[in-house]
Image: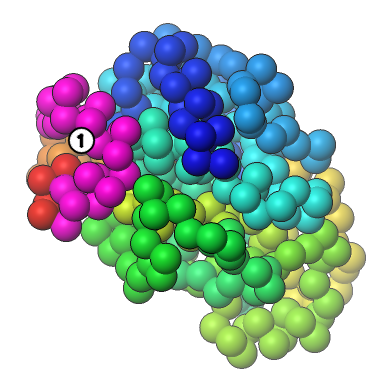
């Protein structure tokens, strides 16, 4: 698997004209962001060796590499889900490739149901933490020590430092941004009203069927994770109506522009210096020298070391 991951990362590296600073994974119906990437290389998942491709409507399945407000970015438009029958190792494969390509941070997005009754369909929510209700974990099995530790810490998986950046950016862009805990289930059936009541007691604000495996795999690699949920519907039993996938896609269409604006500003901020002052300025991006970035991309353990020392 390790070898396949490296082969895939090398294959992509040969076709992408720069090492990316930021990765983005786009959830159901949220693919519009990929259209605004400048000077992009676009590769269908089917052409990328080792990449899984999805069968779900609303998940187009291609990689886009280009610049977002000057920040070298790789966007994965579409993902595969555990409920499609892919083993966890396949589900997190693309996220791990982003880590191996050298992405310092990855923005993981999804469509989710609103569990918190104060939310409404169309809200955007910054993920502060998660509850893994998949019943499994992508790191089950022999540990690949090259990728990260056997028992990765998850205390700050959705890093506070990056969440602060997201909050500042949303404020500056005047985009309302909720914050809350994302609970991920195996799916593919939607939840029952009783499950949603139980999840609310557990502390969940939103529910979905993705993101958590990727967040765990990225956290293990020492990559910064920022999670954004688009609340596409209120979860089962909150409103007196049935849940349908078409509503999920309709809502993502409706909030698409706002979502793209937030994501663009967020990627720009993540690619630059993260201090508060820099967020308000049109500052050039401060990046590690290319040779160092390349070395870190090849060796996740080196990146973790650098992250601990605060030098990446
Ligand atoms: N439940 C689970 N996943 C979802 C939902 C939901 O209500 N809406 C969008 N993805």
Residue in the picture at 65% in, 69% down: 136
Q: Position of residue 200 (x, y in %)?
A: 63, 83
Kindly state the secondary structure of the residue where label 1 is placed.
loop
What secondary structure prevails in the magenta region?
helix
26 drawn magenta: no
Which picture quadrant has residue 120? bottom right
* Magenta stretch bounds: 282-308
Q: Position of residue 246 (x, y in %)?
A: 83, 46
Q: Is residue 166 at least partly visible in the picture?
A: no
Q: Which residue is mark 1?
A: 272
Residue in the picture at 50% in, 40% down: 2
Tell me which colouring the rendered structure shows. rainbow
298 drawn magenta: yes
Report the side of 53 relative to 122 (left or right).
right
Decide which of 133, 99 is in the foreground and name it: 99
Q: Position of residue 300 (x, y in %)?
A: 31, 44
């Amino acid at each position: 698997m390790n070898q396949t991951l490296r082969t895939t990362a090398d294959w992509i590296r040969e076709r992408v004209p720069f090492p990316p600073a930021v990765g983005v994974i786009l959830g159901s119906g949220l693919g519009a962001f990929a259209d605004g990437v400048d000077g992009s290389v676009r590769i269908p998942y089917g052409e990328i060796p080792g990449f899984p491709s999805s069968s779900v409507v609303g998940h187009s399945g291609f990689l886009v590499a280009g610049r977002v407000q000057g920040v070298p970015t790789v966007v994965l438009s579409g993902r595969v889900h555990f409920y499609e029958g892919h083993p966890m190792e396949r589900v997190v494969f693309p996220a791990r490739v982003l880590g191996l390509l050298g992405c310092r941070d990855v923005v993981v997005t999804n469509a989710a149901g609103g569990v918190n009754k104060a939310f409404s369909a169309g809200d955007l929510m910054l993920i502060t933490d998660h509850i893994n209700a998949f019943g499994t974990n992508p790191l089950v099995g022999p540990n690949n020590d090259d990728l990260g530790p056997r028992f990765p810490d998850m205390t700050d998986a959705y890093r506070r430092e990056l969440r602060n950046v997201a909050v500042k950016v949303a404020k500056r862009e005047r985009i309302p941004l909720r914050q809350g805990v994302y609970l991920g289930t195996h799916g593919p059936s939607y939840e029952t009203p009783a499950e949603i009541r139980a999840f609310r007691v557990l502390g969940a604000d939103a529910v979905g069927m993705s993101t958590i495996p990727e967040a765990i795999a990225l956290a293990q690699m020492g990559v910064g994770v920022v999670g954004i949920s688009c609340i596409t519907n209120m979860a089962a039993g909150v409103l007196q109506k049935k849940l349908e996938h078409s509503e999920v896609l309709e809502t993502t269409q409706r909030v698409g522009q706002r979502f793209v604006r937030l994501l663009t500003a967020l990627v720009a901020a993540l690619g630059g210096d993260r201090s508060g002052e820099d967020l308000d300025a049109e500052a050039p991006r401060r990046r590690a020298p290319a040779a160092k970035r390349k070395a870190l991309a090849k060796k996740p353990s080196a990146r973790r070391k650098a992250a601990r020392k605060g030098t990446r």
